[in-house]
Amino acid sequence: MIGFLLCLIFLSGIFEYPELIAIDARYRLKGEAVPFQDIVVIGITQRCLNQFGKFPWPRDYHAKLIDFLKGAGAKVIAMDIFFAQPSHDPSEDEALAASIKRAGNVILPVFMPYRISVKDDHDNFIQVDNLVESIPVFTEAQAAPAHINMIADADGVYRKAPVILRYSERIFFNLGIESAIKFLNVPAGEIAFERDALFIAGKRIPLEKSKFMYINFSAIEAKAQRFAFSDVAKGLVAPKNFKNKIVFVGQASQGMPNADILQTPFKEKYGLTMQASVASTTLENFYIKKTGKLKTCLWIFLLAIFICVIMVGIKTWSSTAISILTFFGLCFVAAREFILNGVLIDFVALAFTIAAAFIFSILFRIRFADRMVKTKELELDSILQAGKLASEGLKTDKASDVILATLINSVGARGLLLRWKNDKTSEFEKTYAYGSAMAILKSDSAGAEERLAQNTIKTQKAALSEEKAHSFLCAPLMLKGEVVGAVTLVDKVVSGKPNEIFFDEADLKLFMILTQQTAISLESARLYEEVNELFLSSIRALAETIDAKDPYTRGHVQRVTDVALAIADEMKLDEKQKKQLTVGSILHDIGKIGIKDAVLSKPSQLTEEEKKIFDQHPDIGSKIMKPIGQLEEMIPLIRHHHESYDGSGYPDGLKGEAIPLGARIMAVADTFDAMTSDRPYRKALPREAAKIEINKMSGKQFDPKVVEAFDNLWEKGKLK
């Protein structure tokens, strides 16, 4: 169940933003690759502008460069420069077009100037409704066109290149990919697509979402051959540097027209060097690929099962150690797979699985321990009632029923014999006999049972005795260190084995536990307190994890809890109500785990659509906590802490006394802390101003009785 739930959470896309951060960490850990050796970059730098003047330059500059590169033996010339408007001198255009045609290997760019909408389908191309390209005199002379568009991920960082744009019936490869195709002299027949791969001359390049290629970023700036346009134009660079090379030509200076500067996992890069990195990625044999969602779901499911099965049966510190080791193991595997094989594992989803499975195992252990404690409490309560009745001398059927129900059913016996000390004679008298014990009293085994009982009373120790025909368990009944009775169980009941009657050491051990009234009651109280403390610590840790996602709300949970409990004390709530209020306050924003970080951490005020998404967190929180039985009484507080006294709140529009009292208290505490805390789009209100706002909303948003208690605390100086 936990594995299935975690798969659904993963498929919801909630991990998209943190996963992008994790991907960047792996990129930086791996470092930039060495560029493909046959790539050269010619950049229009600031030094070029200082020498040749403001861009754009006369087109004969470009014509001369192309002629030079052709003469130097450049295999491919990839121009990241547009010639979208005719020159003032038509002869310049004719001369440049002639140079392009003579070279026969010049690729000119096309560009979609507006935001590109990417459909979630299995086509290998992205359909666009507009493209800008050079004027016809140049496009007719070019060897091929190629697009230079890049599309950022949701966080604004560029990690992938769109492989193909389709406009009308024409398709355009990415400039880097087209350059690689021309460099390898790949005919059209050797280029093929599958749903998740591009094939170029036997190279299988994995595709993300059928349309994108992850870029194996190359250290173009540091390790590739790079020359300034002006140096090449002036003949300062030897022709041999360009022989049989792919030469990228483009702008590499800030402030130039159409000089794209793109944020990458490493640093900002010019569009020119990005295209060179795409070409290098295509030509090398190291391709980056992301694990599919189906495979990730399988790993989530198996990992959740493994951790839950392993950790449920071991101690808390051991399960903590295993979780930590598993997490670091995941870190190692994720880093190793990316560095050596280019595989991007969904790290955040798997790390969350480890954490969630650990918390689940803790909660399961708490729930199991809670059940065990409650079972023991019932057993102990029955024994204590029997002891009380016996110590008072009330030898009634009620006392007998309690003992029989507790001891016979718990251990599984066919009969029971009870001896109780007569306060007057100090003799231990047989007061009750049940089941097969009645027959024992009249049989030859009566003497054996009598000797066992007397020895038990004398030694104050439980014992097991077996005969050919019968099996006995006998234990003393102790009150305040004194033996007040002895109980004997006769013959074990074994389901499906009517002839199996012998008790074993496990039965004796259980029997001893059940008869240690005082010790077990103290132990149960301690265990119960420990279990509940562990439970409270676990949910507090979970809530603080959500709290810490946003630096502006860090500490919010504790502050809301403190104010809510102060109001509860002022209103004289009982301990049970305050305990429910404590847990409810800790978990009141747990539903934010289901809200995208883009909404939670938005540095400006939310739009109406975003507010609707944010307002779902009480409903999400109540649904997340619903399966946990211990929280049944706290769930209404989590769900309704944003309800308004006049019925205008959410999610259910409850009004007045229909809103749980704890939720009404939390509403005031939550709002007060929100108003007195900084937000990305506003500064915190002074506490006095926040207090005035609380009073203004009395009877509208807030319960007047709660506001009155809040005011009393204010007057006492407890909130200032």
Image (cartoon, grey):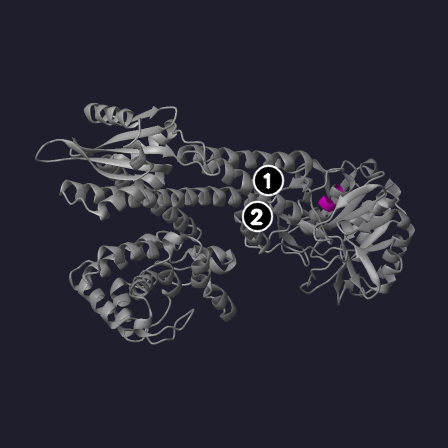
* Image-based side of 553 in relation to 39, left or right: left
Magenta range: 276-280
Side of 215 where 429 appears, left or right: left
Residue 428's spot in the image, x, y percent? 17, 32
Q: How many marks?
A: 2
Tell me where residue 408 appears, x and y as whole percent.
33, 39
* Kind of residue at disc 2: Glu
Looking at the image, residue 202 lies above or below residue 693: above
Q: Is residue 307 left or right of residue 67?
A: left
Distance between mark 1 and mark 2 Cα atoms? 11 Å
Q: Main secondary structure of the magenta part?
A: helix
How far across and how far down the image is residue 605, in percent? 45, 66
Would you name the residue on which mark 2 appears?
19
- Give 43 or 1, whichever is nearer the viewer: 1
Q: Name the quadrant containing residue 330.
A: top right
Q: Which residue is mark 1?
A: 26
In the rendered structure, does residue 329 fall within the stretch colored magenta?
no
